[in-house]
Image (tube, grey):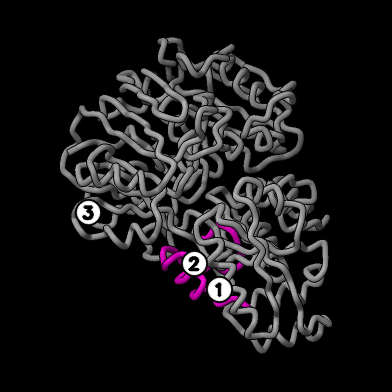
Amino acid sequence: MYEGPVNDPRFPGLRRRGFLAAAGGVAGLGALALAGCAGPSGDAADGGGKPRRGGRLRAAFAGGGASETLDPHLANLFADAARAKALFDKLADFGADLAAEPRLAASWEPNATLDRWTVKLRKASFHNGRPVTARDVLYSFRRIADPKKAFRAKASLEPLDLKATRAVDERTVEFALKRPTAEFPNLLAAFGAYIVPDGATDFDTKPVGSGPFRFVSFTPGRSAVFRRNDDYWDGAPYLEELEFLVANEESARVNSLLGGQVEYAHELSPTTARAHEGKGQIEIVRLRNSAMQAFAMKTDRAPFDDKRVREAFFLLADRKELVDGALSGAGEIGNDLFGKGYEYYAEGLPQREQDLDRARHLLKKAGADGLRVTLDTSAVAAGFTEAAAIFRDQAAKAGVQVKVAMGSKDSYWQDTLDSGTLCCYRSGAMPIESHFSQRLLSGSTTNATKWHHKDFDALYQQAQSTKDKKDRAAVYGRMQRRLYAEGGFLVWGFADWILGTARTVRGVAHRAPANTLDWARFDKVWLA
């Protein structure tokens, strides 16, 4: 990984944050019972002495059944992302604070107007020995952007003008953009934006990537086996082999870990963590503040088209009670903004507290005395049904009647995107800029709060046209202050993402929210 100086001129926007060591305020991966040496990204990683080569690590994830694929551009589940990371590389990936860090890119440099960026590739090879070139980058991005396909990163790459983008030479790509894009490196790091060989179409029988592990075998819905790539550009993995096993039920993942059938179990519950933490049988690892927990109010319809009602709902919430009750304390309180601890987060705003008297006053001014509202929820995500019940009781103290409606796990996200007025909502890690562009612009396709404001859109475009990072941060600050005052997301908490490992597992990074570079980074893990 790149370990150059802060503010290296080759990487506009690349920086390393010192806040990550602060207790309680970080989004990160923590193997709590272990102390140790330096790990990926300079992180503290769990101990165990000098890394040892060899062995097979077996990792259990929830999967997608017989329809699973190793096509990295189709990755949707955590299991998909972890397998893709083992086999393939992106041009960039997100650090612990969600700032883009270079991977296959050796440098990136914008023109004066931020609508053309030149990316130079590092020397890296695919598993078949062929070098990674500009042609592979162009093929990969054009494949993702295919209008006939539904690849995950397509929306993230929308600012690119791929017809005008060109290969300058074997290891240089000049990207043309449809408009100024100051956060262009985020496009390179987008979820699913993996680089595959020019012309590649078969990913399930013998995929060829440039990642730290080579393909051995794949049985959809059951397992995938990979072997160490000794020629990996970022250093050969310590593990000889890596096996991904599918176990959709949390109990199956836990029992497999306890029984020694796997050494790594992804996505455990707070109850499981409490039961096993510090007991010596397994290690509990917490990815601090990985998932935003919120209620989404639709701002384009009654009663939430009145900003006084939205502010009242901000004040109805007892955030600590929600974190303690819905997350079993495995998280920390939110302040009605996405991205706590991430780059550009508005740290200085006062922490909002429950104020039932002020909430009643605002509702009365809005003509909403005795308000009745339906809160859509589902068992689709941990803590959703509990949060709905807790908030229902909190709102009742101010005379607001909240009816909790249970939705289908299979269709919940689509159902609540357009219908209803209030719903439980969750988001994983992404840059704050991406949260704006994907969820809060008038044209955003996943705008769950129906936040449509041309002046807000204009601020986003202003930020993207601003080359100076400090000035750009100031614009993002204005946008967040607006959302804090009258937005549609009541962000009550940030949940830990929890996994477990065998006591023999070493090298797991401590500060890596889910979906960031050092999450599920098995090339840096070893078995003691």
The CA distance from mark 1 to mark 2 is: 8 Å
What residue do we see at 27% from left, 40% from top? 263
Asked whether the beta carbons under mark 3 and mark 2 sit within 8 Å of each other, the answer is no
Q: Amino acid at mark 1?
A: Ile
The CA distance from mark 3 to mark 2 is: 30 Å
Residue 416 picture quarter: bottom right
- Looking at the image, tell me whether mark 3 or mark 2 is earlier in sequence order: 3
Locate residue 30, reporting x and y percent.
33, 54
Left or right, residue 351 beside residue 5: right
Left or right, residue 391 beside residue 54: right
Residue occupied by mark 3 = 35
Residue 390 marker: 1
Q: Amino acid at mark 2?
A: Ala
Of residues 39 and 361, the one drawn nearer to the viewer in this rendering: 361
Q: Is residue 105 visible?
A: no
Of residues 394 and 350, the one drawn nearer to the viewer in this rendering: 394
Q: Quadrant of the N terminus?
A: top left
Left or right, residue 94 beside residue 39: right
Q: Is residue 251 visible?
A: yes
Region in magenta: 316-340
- Looking at the image, tell me whether mark 1 or mark 2 is earlier in sequence order: 2
Kindly state the secondary structure of the residue where label 1 is placed: helix
Q: Quadrant of the C terminus?
A: top left
Asked whether the beta carbons under mark 1 and mark 2 sit within 8 Å of each other, the answer is yes
What residue do we see at 67% from left, 30% from top? 150
